[in-house]
Image: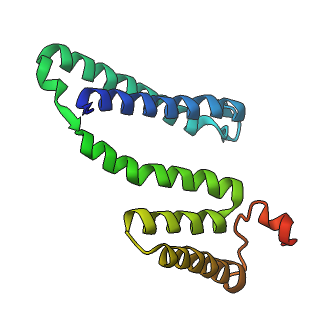
Amino acid sequence: MHIKRIHMELVAATLTAGIGLLAATGSLDLGVGWESSGPQPGYFPFYVGLIVLLASVASAAQTLFALRRHGEKRREIFLEAEQVRRLASFFLPMAVFVVVAIQLGLYVGSALYLFYVSWRQGKYHPLAAVSLGLGFAMALYLIFEIVFQIPLHKGPLENMFGVY
């Protein structure tokens, strides 16, 4: 499996077009016109979103026109199979961390993420990996909750331990 450059260019153009569209439509609720005191709150985000959307469409069109003009040259390989596997081994644990941190809190998510990457990718002994994950979670708690008094998201742990 390999990913071609043209596909990545079109994916990037599609993603940025989605961001631009989201910004433009989201700002409609705030108002995009002018009032007697100046622009409404959604004025600038709306037009920035439109600019991003138009630039994305232009980028996709440029990619497709270049494909027609240069043919096979535009079909060069962007990522080989081994590179895709290496990126996935980095990205997938990070994506799982985000989901776990949202559901179970930053402390649990951080401990599990550090345990996994140090054990699987860092080749640490499982006991050392567990120690690293738990130690980091405790350090986070001490630094943010105790020293700076900034509560971090704890998920169901808040209710279970009656915190805050």
Q: Residue at x 64, y 37 (%)?
A: 42
Q: Which residue is depicted at the point 37% across and 33% down?
A: 12
Query: Residue at horizontal 22%, vertical 16%?
Result: 65
Q: Residue 100, how many percent across, how many down? A: 63, 55
Up-down: is 41 above or below 69?
below
The image shows residue 65, relative to residue 73, as above or below, that is above
Q: Is residue 8 left or right of residue 130?
A: left
In the rendered image, the quadrant that contains the C terminus is bottom right
Q: Does the rendering let one see residue 32?
A: no
Position above or below: 94 against 139: above
Q: Residue at x 51, y 35 (%)?
A: 19
**The quarter of the displayed image where residue 11 is located:** top left
Residue 70 seen: yes
Q: Is residue 61 left or right of residue 136?
A: left
Quadrant in which the N terminus is drawn? top left
Q: Nearer the viewer, residue 76 or 48?
A: 76
Furthest residue toward top = 68
Q: Is residue 117 above or below residue 85?
A: below
